[in-house]
């Protein structure tokens, strides 16, 4: 029972973050859920919840969608994601935990350095590098956000375009990742049951984040995104 309540509270917090910033569900949720359950179950639960919250974000931004921005990221992520799911099934849990720490610290590093102007003006090769790294860690740990966030920040886009890129990417990749999870027999009955239990509370919090997002300026949106990653990195260092 304590595991269920912990999962509910963790995914509620992650939903609020995802609704507010467009990313961060995996970083927050996996980083905490692995303290209460096997890594594979934490990754599967997070995959379902992050997909649902990304769909909510996608609906709220349906008039700002730009498939051209997200298409190369998605194409680069697919083969890397398949490799990541293989690693999830076969790597030692200790190695996976090291990957979790690395990705959260990488998110913290992104939050410490955010340019106020565009530093990347061309897609090649950065979009494919970001997509490949995001796909690898997204498949293995459902923590592929930092490379995608970093890429959008380096492009210097305003908040609606940046968030549109992220949620479009996360929805498409999220659907494919879950299909891969079933094909690879990673999604256990326990993880699926717990996903169903936490779905509604997490989505209510994600919707609350979306409402807050509508009231933020581009600058505040960026600061909120950076604060999320800083908090996650600090939590890992303190633990």
Image (spheres, helix red, strand yellow):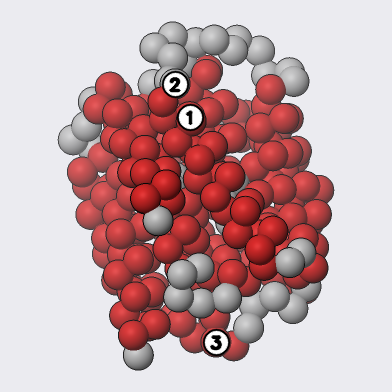
Label 1 sits on residue: 110
Q: State yes or no: discs 1 and 2 in contact (Cβ < 8 Å).
A: yes
Where's residue 65, x and y in %? 48, 35
Residue 64 appears in which quarter of the rendering? top left
Disc nearer the start of the sequence (2/3) = 2
Label 1: few (<14), some (14–19) or many (≥20) C-alpha neighbours in 10 Å:
many
The residue at 34%/75% (across/down) is 6
Name the mark nearer the viewer: 1 or 3.
1
Q: CA distance from mark 2 to mark 3?
A: 39 Å
- Confirm whether residue 81 shows in the render: yes
The residue at 40%/40% (across/down) is 229
- Confirm whether residue 166 shows in the render: no
Q: Which of 64 and 186 lies nearest the eye of the viewer?
A: 186
Label 3: few (<14), some (14–19) or many (≥20) C-alpha neighbours in 10 Å:
few
Q: CA distance from mark 1 to mark 3?
A: 34 Å
Q: CA distance from mark 1 to mark 2?
A: 5 Å
Label 3 sits on residue: 190
Q: Which of 237 and 55 lies nearest the eye of the viewer?
A: 237
Disc nearer the start of the sequence (1/3) = 1
Quarter of the image for the C terminus: give it.
Answer: bottom left
Name the mark nearer the viewer: 2 or 3.
2
User: Left or right of 205: which side holds 77?
Assistant: right
Q: State yes or no: discs 1 and 3 in contact (Cβ < 8 Å).
A: no
Label 2 sits on residue: 113
The residue at 49%/61% (across/down) is 30
Where's residue 228, x and y in %? 34, 42
């Amino acid at each position: 029972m304590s595991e269920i309540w912990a999962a509910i509270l963790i995914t509620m917090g992650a939903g609020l973050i995802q609704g507010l910033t467009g990313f961060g569900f995996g970083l927050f949720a996996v980083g905490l859920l692995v303290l209460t359950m096997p890594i594979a179950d934490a990754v599967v639960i997070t995959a379902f919840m992050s997909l649902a919250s990304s769909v909510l974000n996608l609906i709220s931004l349906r008039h700002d969608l730009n498939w051209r921005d997200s298409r190369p990221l998605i194409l680069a992520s697919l083969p890397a994601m398949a490799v990541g799911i293989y690693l999830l099934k076969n790597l030692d849990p200790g190695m996976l935990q090291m990957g979790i720490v690395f990705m959260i610290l990488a998110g913290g590093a992104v939050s410490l350095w955010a340019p106020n102007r565009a530093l990347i003006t061309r897609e090649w090769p950065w979009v494919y590098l970001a997509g490949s790294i995001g796909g690898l860690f997204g498949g293995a740990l459902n923590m592929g956000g930092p490379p995608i966030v970093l890429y959008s920040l380096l492009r210097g886009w305003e908040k609606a375009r940046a968030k549109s890129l992220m949620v479009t990417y996360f929805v498409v990749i999220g659907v494919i990742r879950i299909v891969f999870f079933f094909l690879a027999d990673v999604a256990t009955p326990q993880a699926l049951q717990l996903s169903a239990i936490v779905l509604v509370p997490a989505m209510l919090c994600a919707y609350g984040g979306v409402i807050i997002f509508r009231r933020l300026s581009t600058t505040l949106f960026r600061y909120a995104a950076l604060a999320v990653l800083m908090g996650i990195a600090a939590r890992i260092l303190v633990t």
